Image (tube, rainbow, N blue to C red):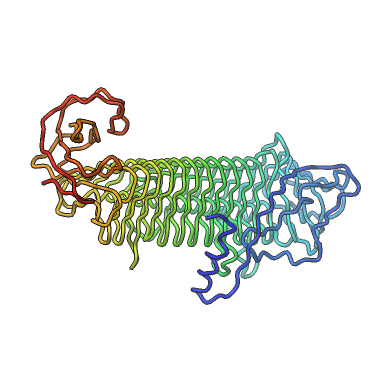
């Protein structure tokens, strides 16, 4: 689901909730990060337009954000227990410096117990250039951006900057802000080639109550609640980000406006350890690229059936993954959306104590390499479409399950799918249709489940399918209306794992040689190689061919025991 197709999708959601309009725009792609000595640079952000975010993808970034006049910089020096300011625009009271005018401010040094406050009504941008700072506060946030049209935090190249807050804050009157070690009440951007280390002992690590953009930089956050929060939206263009959070790792949580509460990640390297969700948005998540290592809720072995959410990537609406490398180990679902999940490319290694990829509406997989090493259910949604990709699925229950609504459909049009499951292999509470691709399925070893379980019409119209089971009464091949021939073989005795199952036609040509990974008592087979002919089934024997996931190609088969001969005269055949 491309972003330019989201208009129709979100409009339908809004109409469902009784809202009539929603607008969209492309995310700014500007990436010029430049300091200049030009006199003619100044902040031209105010073009007379309303800067409030009203569109998914629209944000506060402008090319002038990353360009400033170095001759205009005001220098703030932290001296442990005192602060000096060279220039205009900031005032000092004890160990608190307050920036009350827009402009460019370079901060350096150590502050043992104090705070930088930004509080200005100016329409222009405030830039905080961090140059080897170490700020600790025992009463509040080290950096509190209480009021600013827009603030840019710049991490100077080859510097390491530290922010450490208190475990409890002292507020004036009934205030509950700030609530993060780096806090902004307004739009915030972070970029640069330096490092920012945040130790958040009170609540969040980095938080903006409006939009947050991370354009670059190395950022390490340890927090007792959320790691990084952009309430209205969060855009990560690049960077190296490490988060250890007792709450969620990365979040956008505006639940009052369906145009807000979204996350877009263009690139970057991420290592997220969270007790809550790893990456979570109220509305929409788009990931275009990046390298992600995510562990939530203590990992797959720590699953608890409670109301606490500990999902890897979660959206209360839709998720679009264009590409990336994902290693996700979560106690809850690896990837979860309340509406749509679309995966176009990417490499996924997934381990979970619950479902691996789950949607309450639709899942569409158009490519990528997806390996589910451990999960209860692999892929689950009312409507599932697999058009392409390489999938290896290992589950303790159903591998691919179309369930959860009044209408359920599972479509396989392409791809290469290998399954090892204890529950049903391909399960649909409605229809199951296969028109292309390859499915190799090592199914259940107990009669309570079957390799193919379809409550509606099971249409095997194309592709290659071989699936083993345990001769359950639920076992089935394709329907009589299928376009391709299929056969269900129920054996009289259990065959051990690794014992070959072989079918050859009346000319002695090998149609199938398969080495199941588990014991089996039934086999479902469908292929374009089947037709109206007489076939022999052999059990055991050996093969000199090339074996991949149990299938032999370019083989010479040495027969084992001739089990039975059968003749195909209709689209579906059962051999008892």
Q: Observer-nearest residue: 163 or 475?
A: 475
Specify whether 408 is left or right of 16.
left
Name the outermost residue toward the top: 544
From where the camera sits, is residue 301 visible?
A: no
Is 85 positioned to the left or the right of 173 in the image? right
Please, is residue 73 above or below residue 402 in the view?
A: above
In the image, is residue 25 above or below residue 205? below
Q: Which of the two residues, 273 or 12, is positioned nearer the viewer here?
A: 12
Residue 195 lies in quadrant = top right
Residue lying furthest bottom: 18
Residue 573 coordinates in the image, percent (x, y): 18, 49
Does 231 sit left or right of 119 as displayed? left
Q: Give the x, y percent position of residue 383.
A: 38, 59
Position of residue 51 relative to residue 27, above or below, is below
Q: Give the total of numbered labels.
A: 0
Q: Nearer the viewer, residue 33 or 221?
A: 33
Residue appearing at x 50%, y 40% in the figure: 325
- Give how far across and how far down residue 230 sits, in percent: 60, 57
Q: Residue furthest right?
A: 39
Where does the image place residue 541, in percent across and percent down from the top left? 16, 27
Q: Please tell me in which quadrant of the rendered image residue 210 appears.
A: bottom right
């Amino acid at each position: 689901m491309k972003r330019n197709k989201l208009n129709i999708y979100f409009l339908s959601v809004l109409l469902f909730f009784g809202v009539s309009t929603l607008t969209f725009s492309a995310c700014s792609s500007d990436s010029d990060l430049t300091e200049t000595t030009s006199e003619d640079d100044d902040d031209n952000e105010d073009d007379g337009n309303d800067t409030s975010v009203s569109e998914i993808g629209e944000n506060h970034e402008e090319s002038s954000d990353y360009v400033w006049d170095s001759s205009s910089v005001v220098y703030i020096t932290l001296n442990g227990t005192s602060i000096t300011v060279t220039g205009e625009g900031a005032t000092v009271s004890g160990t608190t410096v307050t920036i009350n005018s827009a402009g460019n401010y370079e901060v350096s040094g150590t502050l043992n117990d104090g705070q930088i406050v930004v509080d200005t009504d100016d329409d222009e941008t405030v830039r905080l250039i961090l140059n080897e700072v170490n700020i600790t506060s025992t009463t509040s946030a080290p950096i509190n951006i209480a009021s600013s049209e827009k603030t840019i935090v710049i991490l100077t190249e080859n510097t390491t900057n530290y922010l450490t807050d208190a475990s409890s804050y002292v507020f004036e009157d009934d205030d509950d802000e700030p609530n993060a070690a780096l806090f902004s009440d307004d739009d915030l951007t972070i970029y640069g080639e330096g490092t920012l280390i945040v130790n958040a002992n009170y609540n969040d690590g980095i938080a903006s109550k409006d939009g947050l953009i991370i354009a670059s930089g190395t950022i390490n956050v340890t927090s007792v609640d959320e790691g990084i929060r952009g309430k209205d939206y969060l855009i990560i263009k690049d960077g190296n980000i490490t988060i250890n959070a007792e709450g969620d790792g990365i979040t956008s949580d505006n639940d009052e406006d369906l145009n807000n509460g979204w996350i877009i990640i263009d690139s970057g390297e991420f290592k997220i350890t969270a007790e809550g969700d790893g990456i979570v948005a109220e509305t929409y998540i788009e990931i275009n690229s990046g390298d992600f290592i995510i562990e939530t809720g203590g990992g797959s072995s720590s699953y608890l059936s409670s109301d606490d959410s500990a999902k890897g990537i979660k959206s209360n609406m839709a998720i679009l993954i264009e590409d990336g490398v994902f290693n996700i180990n979560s106690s809850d679902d690896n990837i979860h959306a309340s509406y749509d999940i679309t995966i176009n490319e990417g490499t996924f290694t997934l381990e979970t104590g619950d479902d691996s990829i789950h949607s309450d509406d639709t899942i569409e997989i158009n490519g990528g390499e997806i390996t589910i090493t451990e999960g209860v259910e692999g892929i689950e949604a009312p409507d599932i479409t697999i058009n392409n990709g390489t999938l290896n699925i290992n589950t303790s229950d159903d591998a691919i399950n179309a369930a959860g609504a009044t209408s359920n459909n599972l479509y396989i049009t392409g791809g290469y799918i290998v399954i090892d499951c204890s529950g049903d292999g391909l399960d649909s509470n409605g229809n199951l249709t296969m028109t292309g691709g390859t499915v190799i399925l090592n199914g259940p070893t107990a009669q309570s489940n079957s390799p193919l379980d379809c409550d509606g019409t099971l249409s095997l119209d194309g592709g290659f399918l071989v699936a083993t089971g345990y001769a359950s009464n639920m076992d089935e091949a394709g329907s009589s209306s299928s376009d391709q021939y299929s056969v269900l073989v129920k054996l009289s005795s259990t065959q051990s794992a690794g014992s070959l199952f072989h079918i050859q036609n009346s000319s002695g040509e090998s149609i199938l040689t398969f080495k199941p990974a588990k014991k089996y008592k039934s086999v479902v087979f469908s292929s374009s190689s089947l037709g109206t002919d007489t076939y022999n089934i052999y059990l055991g024997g050996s093969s000199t061919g090339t074996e991949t996931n149990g299938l032999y190609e370019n083989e010479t088969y040495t027969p084992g025991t001739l089990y039975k001969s059968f003749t195909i005269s209709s689209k579906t055949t059962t051999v008892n």
